[in-house]
Image (tube, rainbow, N blue to C red):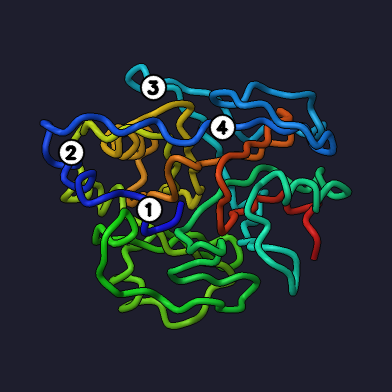
Amino acid sequence: MKAFLSLPIASLACLVLTACGPEPAGQPVMRTEIGSGKADNIGPAEPAAPVSPQPSACTSVTFENAGLIHCVADPAVHTISMVLGPQGGEPYRSLAKLAEAMAGDTASVAFAMNGGMFNGEGKPIGYYVENGERLKELSQTNGSGNFHLKPNGVFYGTKGKWQVKTSDEFYRTVGDRPQFGTQSGPMLLINGKLHPEITEDGPSRTLRNGVGVDSQGRAHFVISQGPVSFGKLARYYRDVLKTPNALYLDGSVSSLWDPASGRVDSAAPIGPLILVQNQEKAAP
């Protein structure tokens, strides 16, 4: 989601003021069958014909009547990397384009989601590291929109050690550049507590996705199947997944590629992509 469009000033107030009306559900998700060139406007994507024989790392769950998709990346069997676009090229802007680019290597892909705020060209506006190369420095600026609802945070990692930290803590404690990193915001959970501007189940509703890392080092990616509040998504991480920290990745345009189920979402153009691959099949 573009940072300057992600949450109008009036909507920021909705995080704490229950008198505000719910926002629209956002862009319709589209399902694309890879190689077909066709897409249908629908709600959360129904499974298409499977394009990978591997078991899915994603499962459908329900939390307080909200449908969610929960995908788990395990450092024992998975790798995580950031992808913006082909080397030397422009951003993909969609998971469908990434899926097409990896059509000959689908077996290596466990799943992928969009993650991190971006500008009108699809390029990150905050900290971004891909394959050990830093393309954007940590943003510590103030402004409007979800990204600037402080504290925001960074999801990053090196060699199977993945973490979510507030941007301030990341700045203070991380000296070595990680193999991957993406900055987004707001934080959903900070040391087991909801972000101070997020209520238990506020009126702001849209498609949303996030990430948190548990005590065993597993990264939990969650995407809603319909409009959901910040608070409900945050409490799912706190009460069910038990991750001390969780980071909001995007909203309205939240998208998932799950090759095992044949699902690849498309909506409005997106930016940074988080790619989870199977270790034994990932490219060296």
Query: Which residue is identified by label 2?
Result: 199
**Disc 2/disc 3 C-alpha distance (Å):** 17 Å
Asked if 74 appears above or below 49 in the picture, the reply is: below
Q: Which kind of residue does numbered mark 3 sit on?
A: Ala
* Disc nearer the start of the sequence (1/3): 1
Q: Is disc 2 in contact with disc 1, using a CB cutoff of under 8 Å?
A: no
Residue in the image at 51% along x and 70% along y = 128
Q: Residue 195: which numbered mark, if any?
A: none
Q: What is the quadrant of residue 79 in the picture?
A: bottom right
* Disc nearer the start of the sequence (3/4): 4
Q: Is disc 3 in contact with disc 4, using a CB cutoff of under 8 Å?
A: no
**Disc 2/disc 1 C-alpha distance (Å):** 22 Å
Q: Is disc 1 in contact with disc 4, using a CB cutoff of under 8 Å?
A: no
Query: Which residue is identified by label 1?
Result: 5
- Residue 251, position as x, y percentages in the image: 42, 43
Q: Which kind of residue does numbered mark 4 sit on?
A: Val
Considering the numbered disc 4 on the image, is that residue within a helix, a strand or a loop?
A: strand
Q: Residue 66: which numbered mark, if any?
A: 3
Most distant residue in the top direction: 65
Query: Which residue is identified by label 4?
Result: 29
Front-most of residues 164 and 233:
233
Q: Which kind of residue does numbered mark 1 sit on?
A: Leu
**Disc 3/disc 4 C-alpha distance (Å):** 17 Å
Considering the numbered disc 3 on the image, is that residue within a helix, a strand or a loop?
A: strand
**Disc 2/disc 4 C-alpha distance (Å):** 26 Å
* Disc nearer the start of the sequence (2/1): 1
Asked if 190 appears above or below 131 in the picture, the reply is: above
Residue in the image at 11% along x and 31% along y = 19
